[in-house]
């Protein structure tokens, strides 16, 4: 059985920073139903932002919306059921969010899937699936929402990457290769959108403890290896990771673009 979190070690979000510039800021998050994405949605809602998110897991999405309401969010997050393999559906959700929120000034490209696989079992179809699940929708979400930011003269795009491609491990090459390309999107688009005051950055998690990670991939040996590699001998939780995303979305991060920020406890 996985070692579940000790409530005493979970971060106390009430002691985290409040950003006045995020009050009523309009935010669109992909993959916001569970894990890191759900924490990003909750933390923006806690800041008073107007949040819309997409996911295909309706049950978890509705649960996360209710968690925001229960926590006293000033604006109830809007959820659109979307399979991000369907780019037309994603584009339609982006357009709907612009209408529902009165524009979108922050995009968090988060959705991904780190299913394990090996290089020798890779097929062309599975390769395409890994690229489409973990990379393609990032670009098309930007394409759909950046014009609204450019028109408004401001915006922040935060692409969630992964430290996986730095690990030199071979248990999910399609995922790791796709995630390495996220930084290419960031640097290219940052140069393109900079004159319009639209910033683009990457935030990379290390081993971030989510329900999925504990249920599917956790082992005592794996966690021991992570702790040996990290400078900080502690688990990293989604609420902690979300704080870097908030900073980059807020005016406080207004001088940051074309950069990659690691939130990994000092593993790399």
Image: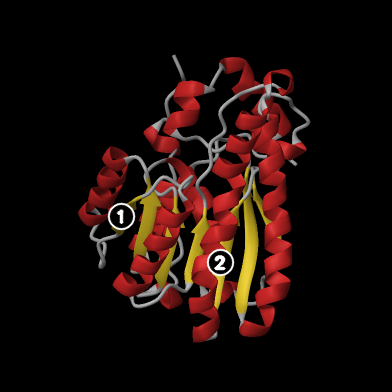
Q: How many marks?
A: 2
Q: How far across and how far down the image is residue 208, in percent? A: 55, 38
Residue identified by numbered label 2: 143
Residue at the top extreme? Answer: 1
Q: Write down the residue under mark 1.
A: 79
User: Is 195 drawn above or below residue 256 in the view shown?
Assistant: below
Q: Nearer the viewer, residue 181 or 240?
A: 181
- Image-quadrant location for residue 22: bottom left
Tell me residue 244's x, y (percent): 56, 58
Name the residue: 37% across, 45% down: 33
In the image, taking residue 169 as reference, residue 10 lies left or right, namely: left
Q: Earlier in the sequence, mark 2 or mark 1?
A: 1
Give the secondary structure at mark 1.
strand
Which SS class for mark 2?
Answer: helix
Checking the image for residue 34, the label placed there is none
Rendered image quadrant of residue 122: top right
**In percent of the image, x 42 and y 76: which residue is there?**
20
Quadrant (top left/top right/bottom left/bottom right) for the N terminus: top left
Task: Name the spot of residue 188 as percent of width and height, x first.
Answer: 73, 65
Foreground pick, 251 / 257: 257
């Amino acid at each position: 059985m996985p070692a579940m979190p000790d409530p005493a070690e979970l971060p106390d979000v009430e002691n985290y920073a409040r950003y006045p510039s995020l009050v009523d800021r309009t935010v669109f998050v992909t993959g916001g139903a569970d894990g890191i994405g759900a924490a990003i949605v909750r933390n923006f809602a806690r800041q008073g932002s107007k949040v819309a998110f997409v996911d295909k897991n309706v049950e978890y999405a509705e649960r996360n919306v209710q968690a925001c309401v229960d926590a006293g969010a000033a604006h109830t997050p809007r959820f659109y059921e979307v399979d991000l393999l369907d780019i037309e559906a994603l584009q339609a959700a982006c357009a709907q969010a612009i209408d529902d929120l009165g524009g979108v000034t922050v995009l968090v490209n988060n959705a991904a899937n780190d299913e394990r696989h090996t290089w020798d079992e890779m097929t062309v179809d599975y390769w395409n699936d890994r690229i489409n699940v973990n990379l393609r929708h990032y670009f098309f979400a930007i394409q759909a929402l950046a014009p609204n930011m450019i028109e408004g003269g401001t915006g922040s795009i935060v692409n969630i990457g992964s430290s996986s491609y730095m690990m030199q491990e071979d248990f999910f090459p399609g995922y790791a290769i796709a995630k390495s390309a996220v930084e290419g999107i960031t640097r290219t688009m940052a140069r393109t959108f900079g004159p319009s005051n639209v910033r683009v950055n990457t935030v990379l998690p290390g081993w971030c403890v989510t329900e999925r990670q504990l249920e599917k991939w956790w082992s005592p040996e794996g966690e021991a290896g992570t702790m040996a590699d990290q400078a900080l001998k502690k688990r990293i939780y989604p609420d902690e990771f979300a704080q870097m995303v908030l900073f980059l979305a807020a005016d406080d991060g207004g001088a940051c673009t074309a950069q990659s920020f690691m939130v990994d406890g000092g593993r790399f």
